[in-house]
Amino acid sequence: MPPESRRRGSTRPSAEDLLGFDTREAGGSLLPAGIDEAGRGPLAGPLVACCVVLTPGLAIPGLDDSKALTPRARLEVRERILEGCLGFGIGLVEPREIDSLGMTRSVALSFERAAASCTAADVYLIDGRPVEGLPFNARFFVRGDSRSRSIAAASILAKVHRDSLMAEADRVWPGYGFADNSGYGTPAHLAALRELGPCPIHRFSFAPVAETVDLFGGLHGG
């Protein structure tokens, strides 16, 4: 990115840069959708992808990569996204599916489910490295959530949705700290696994969980 297109004192793209990226990649006349996922690395909970089609040319204040925003800011920007989009869809892949399919296929499936439940677009801009076999016109961009406004919006919707699911899981299966760790393998979460054993939303194919399945011979709360 040329220096003149950056915010003064920052290497992060401006709102105009994000909008311009989508316009260029969609060829100007095509309607783009953005797709991103949340939850590849956690030991528990679903993989969540979002597909979103934003209103062309509409600026969304505060829009950025979800990782660059505080939880409060994500919620505020989420409302602006929902007000300024033509449609969005969520694609879930549950823990047992992840165990059965593996992560590579699970990621592709989450993208397919998100796109299938969203307003149709001409081209789908997706964060990350290429995923084979998707049934739509997909283009992939490493660090796309910091380059494309559509992908940035999808990253926020996916993150907020998954966090809400894990907060609910914390009420159903207390003791693991899901509301705070979102299922990631924090020291406190690993300690809870060793004390309680796994619950039904843990991913048994992940090594730290598999080890406790062997220890406890079953599920906690399942």
Image (cartoon, rainbow, N blue to C red):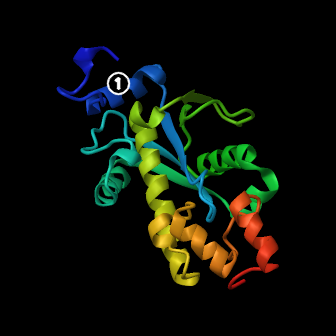
Would residue 181 be found to the left or right of residue 136 on screen? left
Q: Position of residue 26 (x, y in %)?
A: 48, 24
Residue at position x 38%, y 36% in the image:
149
Rendering coords of residue 92 (x, y %): 63, 58
Q: Residue at x 82, y 79 (%)?
A: 217
Observer-nearest of 201 and 208: 208
Which amino acid, mark 1?
Gly
In the picture, residue 62 is in which quadrant? top left
Residue 34 versus residue 68: which sits nearer the camera?
68
- Please determine whether, in this image, residue 49 is positioned above or below residue 64: below
Question: Which residue position holds label 1?
Answer: 20
Quadrant (top left/top right/bottom left/bottom right) for the N terminus? top left
Pick the quarter of the image with the C terminus.
bottom right
Does residue 199 sit above or below 105 in this rendering?
Answer: below
Which quadrant of the view contains residue 146?
A: top left
Decide if residue 165 is in sight here.
Answer: no
Q: Residues within 10 Å of mark 1 (few under 14, many from 20)?
A: some
Q: Residue at x 55, y 60 (%)?
A: 184
Give me the residue at 73% from left, 56% from top. Answer: 98
Q: Which SS class for mark 1?
A: helix
